[in-house]
Image: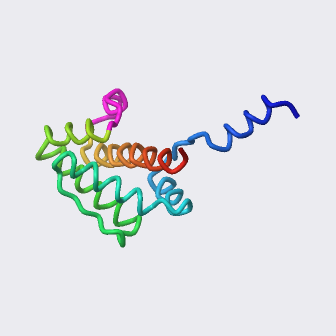
Amino acid sequence: MNIDILIDIDIEKTMYQPPTTTDNLLSEAEKENLYSKLIDQINKDFNSANEAIDFPQSTNPYELKVQLHEKIYRLIQYKFAEYLNLLYIIDVPEETIKQLDGSDLAELSEQVSFLILKREWMKVWFRNRF
């Protein structure tokens, strides 16, 4: 077996494959025993953006999903400048946000919540791998 094949196999094992749904993401975080680190990362970034949030480690995935969605909904509706700052702090790609349909606030906040979780999960996943 030549070295190029070994490198390709090793790279495939460590490549990041982003989850496609919130439920898949939270399930993967639990499966990899990184769910508590995901909660820590979310708390850290929200607090860095001066948006007080404190998910306890005991927060189950369903509660996290619902409470994050509610928080984003309220930010979009009542504190839009703070919402934009949060997206900047978390580093959610602006182009991705611009592609979302903003006609339904509930749906928009659900989609943004997923993008936030996806970005936070990527940070935790990479930190754990490298």
Would you identify the image quadrant in which residue 86 lies? top left
Taking the spot 31% from the left edge, 46% from the top edge, the residue there is: 107
Q: Is residue 100 left or right of residue 121?
A: left
> Which quarter of the image is occupied by the N terminus?
top right
Residue closest to the eye, 91 or 104: 91
Taking the spot 52% from the left edge, 43% from the top edge, the residue there is: 18
Q: How many marks?
A: 0
Task: In the displayed orientation, state which residue is furthest to the right.
Answer: 1
What's the coloring here? rainbow
Residue closest to the eye, 108 or 55: 55
Taking the spot 35% from the left edge, 27% from the top edge, the residue there is: 95
- Please tell me whether the stretch drawn in magenta is mainly helix, strand or loop: loop
Taking the spot 31% from the left edge, 34% from the top edge, the residue there is: 101
Above or below residue 46? Residue 82 is: above
Task: Provide the residue span drawn in magenta.
Answer: 91-103
Q: Does 74 appear in magenta?
A: no
Q: Position of residue 35 (x, y in %)?
A: 45, 61
Would you identify the image quadrant in which residue 49 lies? top left
Q: Position of residue 130 (x, y in %)?
A: 53, 44
Task: In the displayed orientation, state which residue is furthest to the left.
Answer: 78
Q: Does 94 appear in magenta?
A: yes
Q: Is residue 35 left or right of residue 65?
A: right
Above or below residue 61? Residue 49 is: above
Above or below residue 21? Residue 96 is: above
Q: Position of residue 109 (x, y in %)?
A: 28, 47
